[in-house]
Amino acid sequence: MRSSGAAEEVRRSLTRRPISVSPRTCARVATGVIYNHMVVDYALTEAEIDRIFGALADETRRDILGRAIRHEQSVSAMARQYAMSFAAVQKHVAVLERATLVTKERRGREQIVHANRATMGKAAALLESYEQLWIQRATRIADILTIPKGD
């Protein structure tokens, strides 16, 4: 049988993180999704999550975002970096903008692309929640495997 110290450590770790114990069913809750015994709590709606990770699924958009993170650039300056038309790059930027990963600011005739660090922070927090969920699951499996056979 699992020692009470291990169970207490799991309870403490659950209170430190946005993951908490819930019923076994997989169902929607006000601020998260229940996966088996865990709730992944995040400050994004499912539609926002889909837009963010959908936008990040494309290599060109990830590269554009990386350039915007390093320093702001105009869409036309970015378009010169790729073997595609200005319109194609502009469409990639529009997808990133719909996902709120970047914002555009008009300066004269140019549109300057800025990274939106707040959205990236929320996405990173969501990924950290999933990481903690899997760490806790792996820890529970390790605990089960170390239980003496006689218990």
Image (spheres, rainbow, N blue to C red):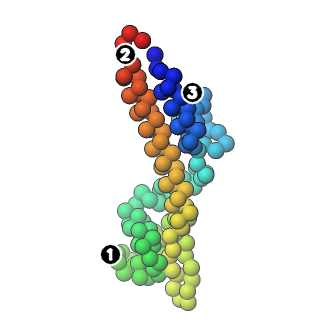
Residue 76 lies, in percent from the top left, at 44, 82
Q: CA distance from mark 3 to mark 1?
A: 50 Å
Q: Is residue 103 left or right of residue 30?
A: left
Q: CA distance from mark 1 to mark 2?
A: 61 Å
Q: Check the image and name the residue furthest to the left.
A: 83
**On screen, residue 31 above or below 138:** below
Mark 2 crowd level (few <14, some 14–19, many ≥20, 10 Å Cα): few
Q: Helix, strand or loop at disc 2?
A: loop
Residue situated in front as seen by the camera: 41 or 14: 14
Residue 24 lies, in percent from the top left, at 57, 27
Mark 3 crowd level (few <14, some 14–19, many ≥20, 10 Å Cα): few
Image quarter in which the C terminus is found: top left
- Residue kind at label 1, given as amino acid type: Ala
Which residue corresponds to mark 1? Answer: 83
Residue situated in front as seen by the camera: 21 or 101: 21
Q: Helix, strand or loop at disc 3?
A: loop
Which residue corresponds to mark 2? Answer: 148
Residue 83: which quarter of the image? bottom left
Q: CA distance from mark 2 to mark 3?
A: 27 Å
Please name the residue shown 47% across and 42% down the image: 132
Residue 148: which quarter of the image? top left
- Residue kind at label 2, given as amino acid type: Pro
Disc on res. 37: none
Disc on res. 24: 3
- Residue kind at label 3, given as amino acid type: Arg
Please name the residue shown 55% across and 35% down the image: 12
